[in-house]
Image (tube, helix red, strand yellow):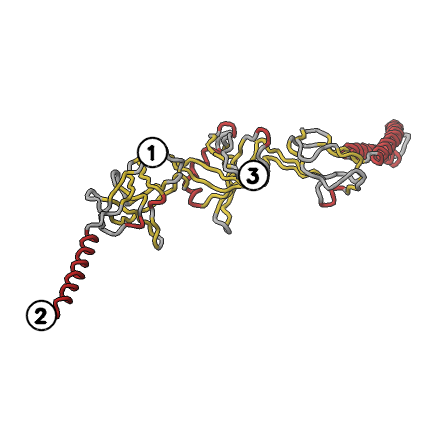
């Protein structure tokens, strides 16, 4: 009786036990997760350094008035190209014409007076030689003639100054370049020197300069090459700088090294480097920011992996590698510069290693995977350190 009463519970237990075994068998039979792997193959890639810089004119001139007066004419349009010697501003010249005429008249009077003192000196010299004039009269005549000559020289200088002031009333462009805006209009009074405000600014933008800060380490690594380049005439220096505009486009003309600053900025730890670029059409303008790129070496046999394959944890970098038995394991690596969508690996990998690039979230240490080989990558972009 006891056994017959317990029979139903034994049957239920057998069913439950059978179901657990089926679940275990199903779990054990689950296939390894699929992943995409890429085989690490050595490649030759150029390594570039890249910096952010700011553009400036190769020549910048603040135009100021040298004489004061009222503006009669503004002869330029803001933002246009002016040539050296082009008229910019004309100041009312009538006061300076009058001053020149007065200086010329005073010069003529001084020259006439000096002719009289010269004649008197000659007369006194003849009398003195004949013992007919005193030494005092002779010396007074000589001194008077010297004073007359000095007055003539002073009047000549006054005429030159008045002539310069008259010329300064016509303000011309000292260089070829793009002229900026002006706050003055016809009828405004312009003080000498602009009263601390320039009339306008002119910048030569073809060629244009790009200035950027390189770290001490970067400078020291290239100091010898920089010295060699700077020893050459500018037109013979290598055109190896590339400029990437703010819109991401590469400037079609490469630049040359122009200068390296004399000192490292103690506040930033950088030294200012200047490169100069052709700029036909004046597309680039002062004040713009741009990136500048310079190839520093050609790396042979470089090992690259997709950036998405690299895992960062607590400042350390790892990749998942798959061995010949299709088991995954984490491997510590030392990444170098980024190259397009790839990352150059300095240490931790060797040619032929298979690295997981897709499916990282399903991996466990030592777990089996189903690897599928990724399509071959296109030619790598230049590397930037």
Mark 3 to mark 1: distance in Å? 33 Å
Tell us which disc is closer to us: 2 or 1.
2
Tell us which disc is closer to us: 3 or 1.
1
Residue at 27 percent across and 40 percent down: it is: 372
Residue 149: image quadrant is top right
Dot 3 or dot 2, earlier in sequence: 2
| Image side of residue 232 versus residue 181, left or right | left
Residue beneath label 2, please? 3
Name the spot of residue 359 as percent of width and height, x first: 31, 46
How many other residues sit within 10 Å of disc 3, few (<14), some (14-19) or many (≥20)? many
Residue beneath label 1, please? 44
Residue beneath label 3, please? 55
Residue 150: image quadrant is top right
Name the spot of residue 58 as percent of width and height, x first: 59, 35
Q: Looking at the picture, tell me which residue is in the foreground, 67 or 87.
A: 87
Residue at 16 percent across and 60 percent down: it is: 15
The quarter of the picture where the C terminus appears is top left
Q: In the figure, 23 relative to 198: above or below?
A: below
Mark 2 to mark 1: distance in Å? 81 Å
Does residue 142 appear in the picture of this structure? no
Name the spot of residue 51 as percent of width and height, x first: 47, 41
Q: In the figure, 169 relative to 312: above or below?
A: above
Does residue 242 appear in the picture of this structure? yes
Name the spot of residue 353 as percent of width and height, x first: 25, 41
In the rendering, which numbered label is found on residue 198? none
Tell us which disc is closer to us: 3 or 2.
2
Residue at 45 percent across and 45 percent down: it is: 215
């Amino acid at each position: 009786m006891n056994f017959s009463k317990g029979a139903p519970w034994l049957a239920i237990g057998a069913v439950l036990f059978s179901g657990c075994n089926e679940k275990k068998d199903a779990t054990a039979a689950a296939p390894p997760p699929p992943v995409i792997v890429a085989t690490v193959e050595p490649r030759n890639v150029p390594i570039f350094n890249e910096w952010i810089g700011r553009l400036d004119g190769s020549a910048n001139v603040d135009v100021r008035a040298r004489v004061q007066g009222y503006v009669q004419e503004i002869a330029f349009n803001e933002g246009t190209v002016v040539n050296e010697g082009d008229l910019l501003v004309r100041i009312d010249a009538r006061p300076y014409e009058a001053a020149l005429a007065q200086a010329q008249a005073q010069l003529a009077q001084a020259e006439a007076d000096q002719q009289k003192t010269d004649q008197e000196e000659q007369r006194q010299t003849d009398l003195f030689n004949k013992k007919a004039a005193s030494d005092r009269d002779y010396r007074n005549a000589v001194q008077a003639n010297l004073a007359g000559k000095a007055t003539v020289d002073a009047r000549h200088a006054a005429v030159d100054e008045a002539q310069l002031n008259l010329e300064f009333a016509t303000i011309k462009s000292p260089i070829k370049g793009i002229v900026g805006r002006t706050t003055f209009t016809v009828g405004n009074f312009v003080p000498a020197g602009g009263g601390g405000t320039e009339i306008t600014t002119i910048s030569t933008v073809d060629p244009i300069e790009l200035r950027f800060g390189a770290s001490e380490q970067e400078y020291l690594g290239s100091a010898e090459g920089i010295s060699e380049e700077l020893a050459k005439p500018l037109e013979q220096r290598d055109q190896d700088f590339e400029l990437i505009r703010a819109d991401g486009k590469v400037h079609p003309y490469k630049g040359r090294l122009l200068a390296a600053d004399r000192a490292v900025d103690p506040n930033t730890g950088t030294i200012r480097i200047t490169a100069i670029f052709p700029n036909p059409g004046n597309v680039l303008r002062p004040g713009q920011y741009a990136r500048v790129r310079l190839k520093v070496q050609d790396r042979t046999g470089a090992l690259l992996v997709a950036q998405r394959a690299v895992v960062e944890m607590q400042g350390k970098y790892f990749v998942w590698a798959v061995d010949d038995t299709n088991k995954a394991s984490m491997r510590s690596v030392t990444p170098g510069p980024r190259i397009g969508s790839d990352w150059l690996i300095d240490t931790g990998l060797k040619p032929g290693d298979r690295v997981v690039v897709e499916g990282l979230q399903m991996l466990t240490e030592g777990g089996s995977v189903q690897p599928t080989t990724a399509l071959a990558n296109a030619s790598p972009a230049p590397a930037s350190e």
